């Protein structure tokens, strides 16, 4: 029996789940990545205990960059009365296969989106994301696009170019996405067309070392509802090398209302700065200083992040 969560009467800034992301202007771009780097990232960030039920492995040699600008609220009966919180975020998504050990052999069980890096411009989003699910949310100053159909955005963080004992953290440009050509357009598409187009590009880049069974498994599930996966942990206060809580959490993400969307006809360019404090490019296998997208899409939607479960 779990004890009741002690809050200040309303729970702000950590509202109770589920969470509605309303009027979300969202763009997603796929970029080629190094599978070995993604595998190491999954091992270091998810596969940290032999006691966990699943071992997560990257499905594809692609990562997805997602920008979202939205109004966030709780669907909990009490916390929904508080109102809507504006939030912008920039994150990287890695599509993984959750492998379950059966008779000494790891077999594919389901797909899950892993979000190793997520940058937000609002403090309560960090508190809620980390405390409830285990989102690796970090604070950033985000420059939003003026039109979601022609996006250009960036994230500045408090970081270090190099680590030194006397170094002082400064504001640094970490992420910048811009058009590759001066004049860009998008082709209108409904939700199924957007999902199918993105899934086809991911599937074309599926890992070559996966056997036919895994490939067939992925092809059946890649367009279905795929949960998010997190490592939720808290550092122990007495021995700060240890975790006083450490579990894998999965949570469903579902689009409730699709208003409009489209697919970009030309590529975009991504620059990720090589900060010592934020080694995103190295850890994600984005080996070039600037990378050209393989595919991109935009949507205006309402979506719901449901309650998580320990797996």
Image (tube, rainbow, N blue to C red):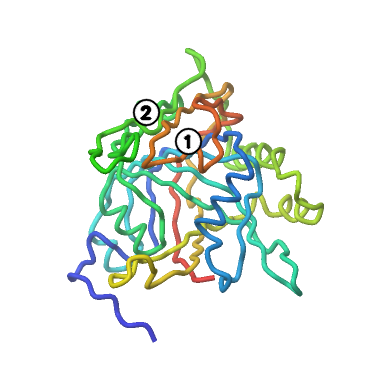
Taking the spot 31% from the left edge, 34% from the top edge, the residue there is: 156
Residue 265 lies, with reference to residue 225, above or below; the image says above
Give the x, y percent position of residue 25: 41, 38
Give the x, y percent position of residue 38: 58, 46
Measure the alpha-carbon separation of dots 1 and 2: 10 Å
Taking the spot 46% from the left edge, 66% from the top edge, the residue there is: 308
Q: Secondary structure at mark 2?
A: loop
First of labels 1, 2 by sequence position: 1
Residue 195 lies, with reference to residue 109, above or below; the image says above
Q: Would residue 85 appear left or right of 153 to someone viewing this image?
A: left
The disc label shown at residue 303, or none: none
Asked if the residue at tag 2 contacts the one at tag 1, i.e. Cβ–Cβ closer than 8 Å, the answer is yes
Q: Quadrant of the N terminus?
A: bottom left
Q: Quadrant of the C terminus?
A: bottom right
Give the x, y percent position of residue 103: 76, 74
Q: Residue furthest left?
A: 8
Quarter of the figure with residue 245: bottom left
Residue 143 lies, with reference to residue 78, above or below; the image says above
Q: Residue furthest top?
A: 182
Residue corresponding to mark 1: 27
Q: Residues within 10 Å of mark 2 (few under 14, many from 20)?
A: some
């Amino acid at each position: 029996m779990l004890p009741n969560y002690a809050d200040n009467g309303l729970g702000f800034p950590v509202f109770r789940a589920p969470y509605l992301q309303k009027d979300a202007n969202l763009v997603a771009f796929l970029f080629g990545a190094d599978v070995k780097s993604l595998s190491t990232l999954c091992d270091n960030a998810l596969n940290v205990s032999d006691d966990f039920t699943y071992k997560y492995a990257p499905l594809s040699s692609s990562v997805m960059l997602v920008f979202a600008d939205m109004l966030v609220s709780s669907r909990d009966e009490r916390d929904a009365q508080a109102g809507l919180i504006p939030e912008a975020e920039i994150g990287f998504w890695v599509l993984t296969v959750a492998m379950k050990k059966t008779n000494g052999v790891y077999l594919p069980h389901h797909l899950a989106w892993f979000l190793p890096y997520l940058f937000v411009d609002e403090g309560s989003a960090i508190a809620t994301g980390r405390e409830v699910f285990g989102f690796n949310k970090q604070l950033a100053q985000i420059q939003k696009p003026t039109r979601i159909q022609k996006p250009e955005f960036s994230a500045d963080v408090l970081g270090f170019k190099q680590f030194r004992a006397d170094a002082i953290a400064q504001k640094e440009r970490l992420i910048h996405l811009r058009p590759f050509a001066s004049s860009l357009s998008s082709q209108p598409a409904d939700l199924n067309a957007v999902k199918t187009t993105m899934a086809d590009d991911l599937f074309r880049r599926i890992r070559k070392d996966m056997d036919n069974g895994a490939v067939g498994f992925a092809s059946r599930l890649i367009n279905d509802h795929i949960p998010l996966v997190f490592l939720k942990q808290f550092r122990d206060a007495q021995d700060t090398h240890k975790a006083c809580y450490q579990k894998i959490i999965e949570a469903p993400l579902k689009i409730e209302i699709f208003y409009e969307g489209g697919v970009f006809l030309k590529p975009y360019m991504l620059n990720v700065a090589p900060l010592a404090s934020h080694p995103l490019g190295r850890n994600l296998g984005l080996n070039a200083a600037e990378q050209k997208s393989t595919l991109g899409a935009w949507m205006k939607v309402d979506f719901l992040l449901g309650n998580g479960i320990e797996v």
